[in-house]
């Protein structure tokens, strides 16, 4: 009988591995061509792996939470069997149980929601107090995430580094032997095995002293309410406990980590976008006919942000705790709401090199594929600045949380018709204008108020001076 293997396919540039999150087919199940069999996750996005063949699943080579490299076999299909009786539960589980287990924690940006529920034996989510204290301890021990200093780190490498207490400085000293000098499992294990000993002080003693220092920080009044014990909630009659899905859990984790990492501060500015509104209304039909793309306000705003980042490159940076990394490429993240209420951030790469037509094409394509869960991992990675359109939900302004390791995020408020004083050569008069607010959250550790304010002032001026005679 021909048994054909299905491997983890190429998932985009710089993606070398993924973690199995859910099996949708068991050993003995019939599968059709292009039918989804297993779901995997990278650090940024979930992906569905389909079968390239029709037949019966005869073997599963990876367990849930196991890290699989690109090109490694995920499952095997018997293409001669059209329909066979499913094996009993014990046989179905044996294939997965025999696969090596990877005991690791996956840390990621917000991901797409898996379409199948997690197994019943998944470890319970830790309490809010436990999780917050863990993040606080990690923050005081290492001001920056290990994943920030060396670009992409696999979940396994990150897990080993965190368990062994490898610091940011130590990590940067490791010469990676993987693709593009990435640190492999062997590299981190060799470093740990040959790590210099710090005098006669034992690791346990060092750890205890570090823990005591952290406990003193956690005992301060400022953090006490955050770490207050949270007893299990009691359900009253009619109450319902709804478990968070994987994406929501990761979003909560990332948001808390960002708040504990960056010194958030906001600047707001009101913008008269009457010229933009009138221009778009006059050209949108022609634009769609000529360019083949719908013209929304989003690509117009993206153009303004790209120009501002070009003018103020100090916002197009990454802060790793001890130094600033000036990013050459201007990659703008575009926060996109999904139908299930979750959020994902596809990235417009090198946005400053695209004209309005190119930006419209990218915005429309990424938005559509984000909602259909068809994004590639590379398409949600390496953003250098993020924009979120809170106006699409009617919000006037807001205070968005910075996506790490970026240092800024812009919230675009709803466009409203308001009475305003209009200044002309003939004098001042009241008129109806289209106005909106820009809300800029930035990391006050490296971005001061003047820079944060000048940045959105540039965007406001760019939009207010929009050329109403601009051709499509």
Image: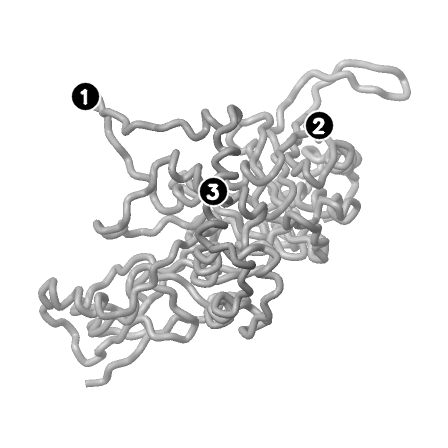
Is there a contact, CB below 8 Å, between mark 3 and mark 1? no
Q: Nearer the viewer, residue 281 or 271?
A: 271
Q: Position of residue 302 (x, y in %)?
A: 66, 45
Q: Tag 1 or tag 3, which sits nearer the N-term?
A: 3
Is there a contact, CB below 8 Å, between mark 1 and mark 2? no
Q: Nearer the viewer, mark 3 or mark 1?
A: 3
Residue matched to label 1: 237
Whether residue 26 sits left or right of residue 53 in the image: it is: left
Question: Which structural element holds mark 1?
Answer: loop
Q: Tag 2 or tag 1, which sits nearer the N-term?
A: 1
Question: Which structural element holds mark 2?
Answer: strand
> Is residue 6 visible in the rendered structure shown here?
yes
Q: Nearer the viewer, residue 39 or 425?
A: 39
Q: Is residue 101 above or below residue 121?
A: below
Q: Position of residue 339 (x, y in %)?
A: 40, 41
Q: Position of residue 264 (x, y in %)?
A: 62, 33
Task: Give the residue drawn at x 72%, y 57%.
Answer: 328
Residue matched to label 2: 269
Q: What's the distance in space between the residues labelled 3 and 1, CA to CA?
A: 43 Å
Q: Is residue 64 above or below residue 73?
A: above
């Amino acid at each position: 009988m021909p048994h054909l293997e299905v491997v983890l396919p190429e998932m985009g540039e710089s993606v070398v591995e993924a973690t199995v999150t859910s099996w949708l087919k068991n050993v003995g199940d019939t599968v059709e061509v292009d039918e989804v069999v297993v779901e995997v996750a990278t650090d940024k996005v979930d992906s569905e792996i389909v079968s390239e063949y029709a037949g019966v699943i005869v073997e599963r080579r990876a367990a849930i939470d196991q890290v699989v490299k690109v090109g490694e076999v995920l499952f095997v299909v018997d293409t001669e069997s059209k329909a066979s009786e499913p094996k009993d539960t014990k046989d179905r589980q044996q294939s997965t149980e025999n696969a090596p287990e990877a005991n690791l924690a996956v840390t990621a940006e917000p991901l797409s929601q898996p379409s199948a529920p997690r197994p019943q034996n998944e470890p319970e989510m830790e309490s809010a107090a436990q999780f917050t204290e863990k993040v606080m301890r990690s923050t005081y021990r290492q001001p920056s995430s290990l994943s920030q200093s060396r670009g992409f780190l696999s979940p396994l490498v990150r897990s080993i580094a965190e368990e062994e207490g490898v610091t940011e400085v130590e990590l940067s000293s490791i010469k990676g032997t993987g693709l593009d000098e990435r640190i492999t499992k062997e590299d981190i294990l060799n470093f740990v095995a040959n790590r210099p000993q710090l005098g006669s002080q034992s690791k346990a003693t060092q750890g205890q002293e570090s823990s005591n220092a952290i406990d003193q920080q956690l005992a301060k009044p400022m953090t006490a309410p955050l770490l207050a014990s949270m007893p299990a909630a009691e359900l009253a009659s009619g109450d319902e406990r709804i478990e968070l899905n994987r994406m929501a859990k990761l979003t909560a984790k990332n948001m808390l980590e960002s708040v504990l990492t960056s010194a958030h501060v906001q600047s707001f500015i009101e913008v008269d976008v009457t010229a933009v509104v009138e221009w778009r209304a006059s050209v949108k039909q022609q634009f769609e006919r000529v360019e083949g793309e719908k013209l929304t306000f989003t690509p117009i705003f993206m153009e303004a942000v790209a120009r501002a980042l070009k003018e103020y490159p100090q916002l197009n940076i990454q802060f790793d705790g001890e130094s600033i990394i000036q990013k050459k490429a201007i990659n703008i993240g575009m926060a996109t709401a999904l139908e299930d209420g979750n959020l994902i951030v596809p990235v417009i790469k090198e946005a400053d090199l695209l004209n309005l037509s190119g930006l419209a094409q990218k915005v429309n394509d990424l938005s559509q594929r984000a909602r259909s869960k068809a994004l590639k991992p590379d398409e949600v990675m390496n953003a250098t600045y993020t924009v979120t359109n809170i106006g699409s939900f009617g919000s006037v302004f807001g205070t968005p949380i910075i996506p790490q390791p970026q240092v800024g995020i812009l919230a675009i408020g709803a466009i409203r018709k308001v009475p305003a004083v209009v200044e002309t050569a003939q004098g001042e008069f009241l008129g109806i204008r289209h106005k909106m607010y820009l809300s800029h959250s930035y990391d006050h550790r490296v971005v001061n108020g003047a820079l944060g304010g000048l940045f959105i002032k540039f965007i406001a001026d760019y939009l207010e001076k929009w050329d109403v005679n601009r051709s499509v």
